[in-house]
């Protein structure tokens, strides 16, 4: 029977749970993830944070590294998480601990902005990047565990819709985030640096609301693990996955190429500022426009993913990114940059919906955390390479930002080829065991 005291389900209830009992967990999980996206919209990594860094005196090359700081912090630690969580009957306590610490760290940005923004901007820039990395690192430590939990609480036939609902509600709330950004930046009530301090404070409060919803999750207990592997056996098992599941290896190659998008997304704001001047008055509008677009389109991506497969959605994500880069290259003022930010945001939403879900479908159920860790960690060097290369090319070559934009389009086209020919777009081509 359901154990109310421990807020969990037991193995003999799990089949019934998958048929109808998952609705409660789906609701609280959607609220958790949606409010997390809401918080991110207030400190948008494509609009607000790059503008904040530029205000602190960061170069285009350093701003271009922001996606790398985020992705490396998020992805690199995931390789050790499966080893840390093996032998645990419940994943939820571990996830709660990591998320409580990371949210506590983010709150520190509020006093730091007040104390350092005007007197020591370089020190504040270093503190911001350090806290941003630490927050993503802790989130990365929790991701395979959280992914395994979500795979247990959300049935396979509902996972695409689940992520689509997250994106829809999160970005519906994100409209409010855009209003908040516009008001704080344009009302005249909040001068610099108070305006950025307010945005960090609001995002922190919303992050904690998201955390409260997560703590309400009821974790299904499917089976008790047999024991804990040695470090040597764990490392050998990772190598075995790469040897036996060739389609998964191709998927990792595709993912490595896909991360070339950091050469565009990480430079759009700096590119616009270099061509069209200050951006503060447009920031809230960009956030709102992107948010509305994702809110409308994300549920459609979820339905398409559930019915046609996550490969189709990932292909769409790449095409949208390519479109965003082309629009940036053709822009003549800040108004004409709207399509760039909208297409980039919609493309990222499609990526978020299907990247993890595709891994679920390629992985055996008892090895999901390991597959998630591998697909998250192996592409990290490519993310760093693309980010450094993009910023360096923008600063040091005569073509400026156009060269990294063109290179990222070419690499994205290569990713499309690998996805179609090596991984497959339709669900019936995917196999959770080894083989071609």
Image (cartoon, rainbow, N blue to C red):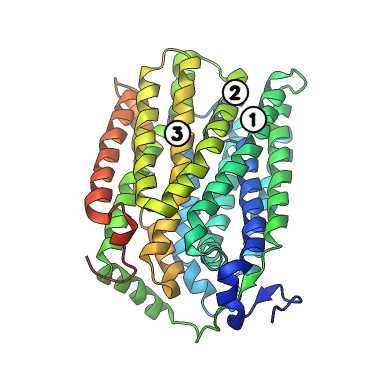
Marked residue nearer the N-terminal end (2 or 3):
2
The numbered mark at residue 285 is 2
Asked if the residue under mark 2 is in contact with the one under mark 1, i.e. CB atoms within 8 Å, the reply is yes
Q: Is residue 144 above or below residue 287?
A: below
Q: Nearer the viewer, residue 381 or 349?
A: 349
| Residue at the disc numbered 3 | 344
Q: CA distance from mark 3 to mark 1?
A: 16 Å
Q: Nearer the viewer, residue 71 or 166?
A: 166
Q: Tell me: 226 left or right of 5.
A: left
| Residue at the disc numbered 1 | 178
Residue drawn at point x = 48 percent, y = 26 percent: 269
The numbered mark at residue 278 is none
Marked residue nearer the N-terminal end (3 or 1):
1
Q: Tell me: 30 left or right of 367.
A: right
Q: Is residue 232 above or below residue 117?
A: below
Mark 2 residue element: helix
Instruction: State the image coordinates of residue 348 (x, y, percent, origin top left).
Output: 46, 41
Q: Quadrant of residue 195?
A: top right
Q: CA distance from mark 1 to mark 2?
A: 7 Å
Q: Residues within 10 Å of mark 3 (few under 14, many from 20)?
A: many
Instruction: State the image coordinates of residue 206 (x, y, percent, origin top left).
Output: 71, 45
């Amino acid at each position: 029977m359901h154990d109310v005291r421990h807020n969990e389900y037991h193995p003999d209830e799990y089949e019934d749970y998958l048929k109808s009992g998952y609705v409660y967990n789906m609701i609280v999980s959607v609220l958790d993830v949606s409010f997390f996206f809401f918080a991110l919209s207030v400190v948008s990594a494509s609009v607000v944070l790059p503008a904040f860094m530029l205000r602190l005196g960061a170069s285009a090359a350093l701003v271009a590294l922001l996606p790398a700081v985020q992705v490396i912090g998020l992805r690199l630690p995931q390789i050790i998480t499966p080893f840390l969580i093996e032998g645990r009957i419940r994943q939820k306590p571990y996830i709660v601990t990591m998320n409580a610490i990371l949210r506590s760290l983010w709150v520190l940005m509020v006093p730091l902005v007040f104390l350092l923004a005007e007197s020591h901007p370089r020190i504040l820039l270093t503190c911001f990047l350090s806290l941003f990395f630490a927050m993503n690192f802790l989130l990365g430590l929790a991701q395979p565990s959280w992914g395994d939990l979500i795979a247990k609480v959300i049935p396979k036939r509902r996972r695409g819709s689940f992520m689509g609902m997250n994106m829809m509600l999160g970005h519906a709330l994100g409209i409010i985030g855009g209003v908040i950004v516009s008001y704080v930046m344009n009302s005249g009530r909040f001068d610099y640096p108070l305006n950025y301090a307010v945005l960090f404070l609001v995002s922190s409060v919303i992050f904690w609301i998201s955390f409260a919803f997560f703590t309400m999750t009821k974790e299904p207990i499917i089976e008790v693990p047999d024991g804990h592997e040695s470090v040597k056996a764990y490392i050998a098992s990772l190598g075995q996955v790469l040897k036996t599941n060739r389609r998964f290896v191709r998927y990792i190659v595709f993912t490595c190429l896909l991360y070339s998008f950091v050469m565009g997304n990480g430079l759009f704001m700096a590119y616009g500022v270099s061509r069209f001047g200050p951006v503060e008055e447009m920031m809230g509008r960009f956030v709102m426009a992107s948010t509305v677009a994702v809110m409308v389109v994300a549920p459609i991506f979820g339905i398409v993913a559930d019915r046609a497969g996550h490969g189709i959605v990932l292909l769409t994500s790449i095409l949208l990114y390519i479109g965003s880069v082309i629009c940036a290259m053709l822009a003549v003022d800040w108004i004409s940059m709207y399509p760039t930010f909208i297409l980039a945001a919609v493309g990222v939403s499609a990526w978020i919906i299907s990247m993890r879900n595709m891994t679920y479908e390629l992985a055996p159920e008892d090895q999901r955390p390991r597959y998630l860790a591998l697909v998250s960690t192996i592409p990290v060097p490519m993310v760093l390479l693309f980010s450094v290369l993009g910023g360096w090319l923008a600063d040091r070559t005569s073509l400026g930002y156009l060269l990294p934009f063109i290179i990222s389009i070419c690499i994205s086209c290569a990713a499309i080829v690998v996805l179609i020919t090596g991984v497959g777009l339709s669900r019936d081509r995917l196999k959770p065991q080894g083989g071609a």
